[in-house]
Image (cartoon, coloured by chain):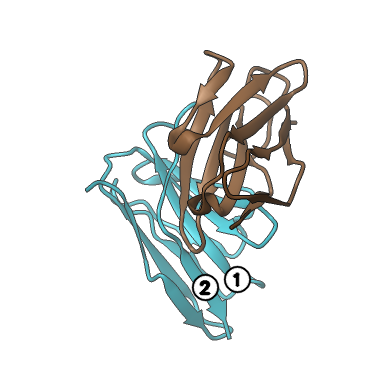
Chain colours: A brown, B cyan
Amino acid sequence: AQSVTQLDSHVSVSEGTPVLLRCNYSSSYSPSLFWYVQHPNKGLQLLLKYTSAATLVKGINGFEAEFKKSETSFHLTKPSAHMSDAAEYFCVVSDLYSGGGADGLTFGKGTHLIIQP
Amino acid sequence: DGGITQSPKYLFRKEGQNVTLSCEQNLNHDAMYWYRQDPGQGLRLIYYSQIVNDFQKGDIAEGYSVSREKKESFPLTVTSAQKNPTAFYLCASSLQREGAGELFFGEGSRLTVL
């Protein structure tokens, strides 16, 4: 069965410093991987996705993530945090053939990103 | 603008009452989904539908019901059989069945049982 683990429930950084949100996954096949962002009391918005093309994926708002098969990781990074980045971030693995959710998706439990002024 | 509209944004219910959450999309997407979000739990799938007049149970369907009579509409009913209904409910859609595509989300409905 597939799974996804977000290693930190909360991450706090100062404005202007780098952001690292960690995600490890488990899947028997070649998965698709996503990062979504959720601002308070809002729906989720796609930041970026990996679907077996380039391993370094660039997303919106300056975020990027690198797929590392040997480490089964898909960490999200941003060189310089902005106050507007404060939100909840979800790592998602999608694999129709490895179980997980009924629709083939498994969501991580989320990482709350706090930006200090 | 295309998107997903959920209503109401906030809803209060007395124990023993059924309530229906609305979800409408104008993206011409075939697939629609309902998720439940609890603090620190991520998202859990309640029901999904890939085509009109067809829907499938998700991981936590007990106590919920849905219908898909029109492509653009996928309402969720939280029944009195749902023992712990207080949560944030999210509706989503995708162009195809999820596995490679992007999910588009509504802004959510927060249900509180009094």
Q: Is residue B24 left or right of A98 when viewed as pictured? A: left
Label 1: state its secondary structure: loop
Q: Is residue B82 left or right of B40 when viewed as pictured? A: left
Front residue of A91/A116: it is: A116
* Residue plotted at (55% across, 77% down): B112
Residue A53, placed above or below residue B29 = above
* Residue plotted at (72% across, 30% down): A25
What type is the residue that disc 1 sits on?
Pro
**Which residue is label 1 attached to?**
B85
* Residue plotted at (49% across, 64% down): A41
Query: Callout 1 environment at 10 Å: few (<14), some (14 to 19), or many (20+)?
Result: some
Label of residue B111 in the image: 2
Residue B107, placed above or below residue A98 = below
Q: Is residue B54 left or right of A21 when viewed as pictured? A: left
What type is the residue that disc 2 sits on?
Leu
Front residue of B70/B102: it is: B102
Which residue is outermost to the left? Answer: B1
The quarter of the picture where the C terminus of chain A appears is: bottom right
Viewer-side label of 2, 1 = 2
Residue A111, placed above or below residue B10 = above
Query: Callout 2 environment at 10 Å: few (<14), some (14 to 19), or many (20+)?
Result: many
Label of residue A112 in the image: none
Q: Is residue B25 visible?
A: yes
| Chain hosting mark 2 | B
| Chain hosting mark 1 | B
On the image, the x and y values in percent for residue B44 come to 62, 51
**Mark 2 or 1 closer to N-term?**
1
